[in-house]
Image (cartoon, grey):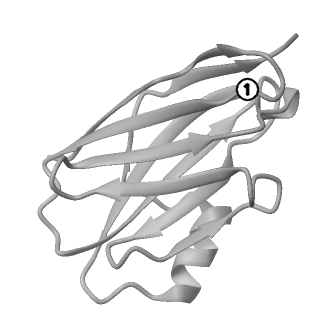
Amino acid sequence: QVHLVESGGGSVEPGGSLRLSCAVSGLTSRYYYMAWYRQAPGKEREGVAVIDSGGSTNYADSVNGRFTISQDKAENTLTLQMNNLKPEDTGMYYCAVDSSSTWPDPLRRYSLLGNADFAHWGQGTQVTVSS
């Protein structure tokens, strides 16, 4: 059973940085997609960044150039480095994982930013950006 645990959230001032981590256990598939989503109060959950088992990535326009998603396969960890944070980045951040039976598809990777079609989710970590 896949289990995800996020950490690294906190409160920072605008322009600051945070690094989120997601410990992944129980994932046995050779091919997969991993992602970070976020949800602000009163808003729908939105995709932030996706990475596949080959290391290819997609980002939401709102974070492109500021956030970096990466994975450490040896440590079974998914990371989101967030720089130049803005108040609109405030929200609960979730990591998500979905297995694939085939080599990752770029179209599917892109679509996962918008459809949240992941089988496994963490409990989330809060990020607050405020002066």
Left or right of residue 46, residue 106 in this image = left
Query: Is residue 87 rendered to the left or right of residue 20?
Result: right
Residue nearer the viewer, 110 or 61: 61
Q: Position of residue 5 (x, y in %)?
A: 32, 31
Q: Residues within 10 Å of mark 1 (few under 14, many from 20)?
A: some
The vertical placement of 13 against 81, above or below, is above
Q: Amino acid at mark 1?
A: Gly
On screen, residue 61 above or below 39: below
Q: Where is residue 28 shown, x and y percent of the image? A: 11, 62
Residue 122 sits above or below residue 125 on the image: below
Residue 81 image point, x, y percent: 55, 43
User: In the image shown, does 34 or 19 lie closer to the viewer?
Assistant: 19
Q: Residue at x 65, y 39 (%)?
A: 38
Q: Which residue is drawn at the image coordinates 45% and 88% (left, top)?
A: 105
Q: Is residue 96 left or right of residue 12?
A: left
Q: Nearer the viewer, residue 129 or 97?
A: 129
**Residue 95 percent coordinates (x, y):** 45, 43
Q: What residue appears at the point 53 percent right and 48 percent down from the top-left corner?
A: 36
Q: Helix, strand or loop at disc 1? A: loop
Position of 112 relative to 10 (above/below):
below
**Image quadrant for the C terminus?**
top right
User: How many numbered discs sit on the rendered protein?
Assistant: 1
Residue drawn at the location 46% of the way across and 24% of the way down: 8
**Disc 1: which residue:** 16
